[in-house]
Image (cartoon, rainbow, N blue to C red):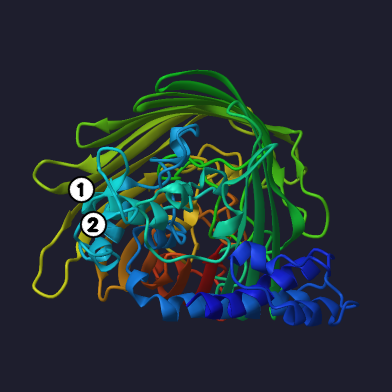
Amino acid sequence: MKPLLGLFGQPFFIVFGRYLNSPNLNVATWICGYSSRSSLLKSFAMHDQGSDVVQRFSSSQFRLAVAILAQSAAVSLLSPSIAVADETQLVETVVHLASTQEQASPSDLPLEESTLATSQSVENAISDNPDADSQAEVPSEAIVLSSQCDCCTTKCCTKADKQSATKAMKSAYAGVFYANNFSYLCDPCYTGPSFCGESLKNMRTRFGTISLGGETRFRYQDERNFRGPNGLTGNDDSFLLFRQRFYADWKMTDDVRIYGEILDANSSGENFQPLIIEENDFDILNLFVDLKLFECGDTSLIARIGRQEMLYSAQRTISPLDWANTRRTFEGVRALYKNNDLSLDAFWTRPVRVNPKGEDRSDEKEDFFGAYATMKKAGGGSVAAYYLGYNSDNVSANPILNRDFTFHTVGGRTDGKTSGGMLYDFEGAYQFGKNNNGTDHSAGFVTLGLGRKLDCRNFQPTVWAWYDYASGEKNFADVSIGDNGYHHLFPLAHKYNGFMDLFGRRNLHDLSTQVITPITDKVNVLVWYHYLMLAENTLPYNLAMIPYNLGGVPAQDRELGHEIDVLFNINLSPRDNVLLGYSHFFGGDYYDPAGIGPANGDKDADFFYAQFQTRY
């Protein structure tokens, strides 16, 4: 198997060298750990050195993509037993779900990247496939690590040891890459498949331990009647999104760490202007230093300084926004305290604004700060409490876009499973401060979710019922980005109120029901129905908290409509994933008056997407 994987894997890393303008970067053998093919390396390195690598979707990117697809297909075809329904993949799909990989992280990292990356209850519902681990098992009898194993002096691996190592392999990639954990590579009980790029993980040098890796993602989207940021627009479009991430993790000592990550995001084939979340030519996503200030047993305190993504709990308030092609990041400082099952983060940051063709910079007129505490293993689940402050001095002459406000949010969340098998996920927050017109701000949101896994004859579906509420501005004349409605801060909005992203979490009621079930070892399906209504008779808001349909009149009816989402998650391997999704929106009575919605009067919309993602 390894010679074939090397044949497919080497072109990727050769093209990777050209992509970084280093045509002599002959590293394929080292990275993949396979035999050298110098003539192949030479022909790739010398071919077409003058090509343009800064096009919107350059020829180098295309060749890079083809090479990665080839090696990924090889891994998938040659290792079918390990390509099971991986819990981490579908969780990010729905969270994106990205492809949904927010799993355990190294012990020196904060809890928010380890156990709180996704909703535990939703994750369980999506990923609880009883056959997943068994499909990837090595032989059940205990094995030894040498021909003369003595369990008194050498390590002997039991079935549980091997299952644990396989589980660690599946969950190696986290929702933020600086929380990745490749400790399974040093586990003698791991006897599973090899993946291209593993030779670049946990490399020990005289200067410390270094890990290199990345991700490549393609997504085709077809949008009917809603292209643009503001709900139903009457515009149709179809296009291809491409995203490339590379990271370097350097642990200089036990107390000092430097992490860097770059991102390149492009779109092609669209008829309309790309959205701000779709394009970002080569820019820095993460670049920070970790300083371990204190450690004693299970207690530690880390200071993190620099540009950094943040991800907390179920991502309803803070998220790196993986569904977006560009992702979200911040600049500032964090203090990360952990004591056994308790974690406490305090931070002061500024949001980094995407400049698609230039350098991304932090917004000096905005401050985002707060504290997030989490206790895992609290009863049947976890408990979180947080305070988040958001101050903006971005004054605009346009009152709708004026961001001259100060909001303070105090909230909490609990999720888990009862002794009777009931799944639950409850979260809520109260928000206060000053609106952009100087009036007092008073708002809030509530999420209530109950679920249960059913044991049917042919399927084992998990069924959820959800209710989401977010308060809105009551006065039509005062609607704006800084009005008296609840501001959702920096969430993964795509996850919760419909995959079509027609409405933000503001001035909204959302009653929904969800069914998730595995249909084969490799395929899971999710069906999610939403009934959406306005909380106040004013306007809906987009995902940037900007009200739209301003040319119309206050809502004559609160019924926004119905949305149904269908998503297939296909796990080719623990490193390669395909998403196929379709959504349809049925417009409600809110759109009946003239001046609201598309000029053509069409109140329905359709969304289809197909995504391939590989990590290495």
Residue furthest to the right: 50
Q: Which residue occupies the foreground of this view, 5 or 299?
A: 5
Q: Position of residue 235 (x, y in %)?
A: 61, 77
Above or below: residue 465 compared with residue 571: above
Q: Amino acid at mark 1?
A: Leu
Residue for point 80% across, 70% down:
18
Residue 434's label in the rendered image is: none
- 470 vs 322, left or right, is left
Residue for point 59% across, 51% down:
544
Dot 2 lies on which element? strand
Query: In which quadrant of the rendered view does residue 306 lie?
Result: top right
The answer to the question of whether label 1 and label 2 lie on touching residues, with beta carbons closer than 8 A, is yes
Quarter of the image with the C terminus is: bottom right
Name the residue that disc number 2 marks.
464
- 480 vs 374, left or right, is right
Mark positioned earlier in the residue sequence (1 or 2): 1
Q: Position of residue 158 (x, y in %)?
A: 23, 51
Above or below: residue 48 compared with residue 263: below
Do we see residue 130 in this rendering? yes
- 399 vs 55, left or right, is left
Q: Amino acid at mark 2?
A: Trp
Q: Alpha-carbon distance for marks 1 and 2?
A: 8 Å
Name the residue that disc number 1 marks.
423
